[in-house]
Image: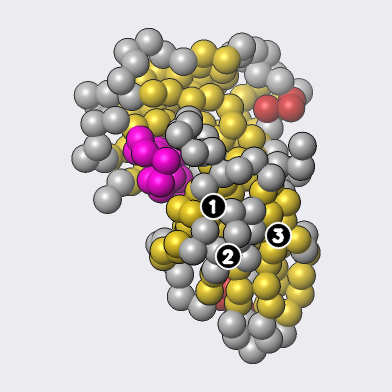
Amino acid sequence: AQTVTQSQPEMSVQEAETVTLSCTYDTSENNYYLFWYKQPPSRQMILVIRQEAYKQQNATENRFSVNFQKAAKSFSLKISDSQLGDTAMYFCALKPHGANSKLTFGKGITLSVRP
Amino acid sequence: NAGVTQTPKFQVLKTGQSMTLQCAQDMNHEYMSWYRQDPGMGLRLIHYSVGAGITDQGEVPNGYNVSRSTTEDFPLRLLSAAPSQTSVYFCASSSPPGFDTGELFFGEGSRLTVL
């Protein structure tokens, strides 16, 4: 079984500042993917960033980057230069390798960006 | 390119009624799944399918039924709706044959209210 834990239900950040969202996980698999998904008020689930567990280098996508600590089973998301459009729920998720394996989500965190 | 299409987007039911949430994808994905999203609970897997004719239960399958007669379609049936099934439902798919990126592609969600 695999679990994903997001312990902070809500966070707030000032526009243009940097914020870090925390995520820890547990899995017995050696090969897996980690994801951060964004869900704005429109309800659409949007992939923010993806990390392959076998890669030591942290993934980055423009203003979004991760701090992946495999031994600690930690996968935090850093948002730089926060924008009003970043206001959303953010979900951390884990999926073992294999086309037929299941994706497990954390409970999500609500991020509010203040003008 | 339509991606994952869910219908209806909104539905109100009375307790005991039955209904089907439709899901279709045009990306030749083998894996399809249904999640429900409830406040404070994240997304929980209801049922999933790894190909036509193959389905399996997820974390919260009770009260729901699925079938997969074609690669494209994966309907979710509520057999006798209960207020506890009031939720937002997401269909998601991933992985064309032989190409697993781990990413799930989501429909826009269906908000179901059971009175």
Left of A16 or right of it: where is B79?
Answer: left
Which secondary structure, mark 1? strand
The location of residue B23, given as percent across then percent down, is: 67, 58
Compared to residue B73, the image places residue B81 above or below, namely: below
The location of residue B61, given as percent across then percent down, is: 45, 70
Q: Which amino acid, mark 3? A: Ser
The nearer-to-camera label among 1 and 3 is: 1
Q: Which amino acid, mark 2? A: Ser
- Quarter occupied by residue B56: bottom left
> Residue at image x 69%, y 77%?
B19
What number is the disc on residue B110? 3
Q: Chain of mark 3?
A: B
Q: Which amino acid, mark 1? A: Met
Q: CA distance from mark 1 to mark 3?
A: 16 Å
Compared to residue B14, the image places residue A86 above or below, namely: above
The nearer-to-camera label among 2 and 3 is: 2
Compared to residue B29, the image places residue A37 above or below, namely: above
Report the magenta residues as a range. Answer: A92-107
- Quarter occupied by residue A67: top left
Q: Chain of mark 2?
A: B
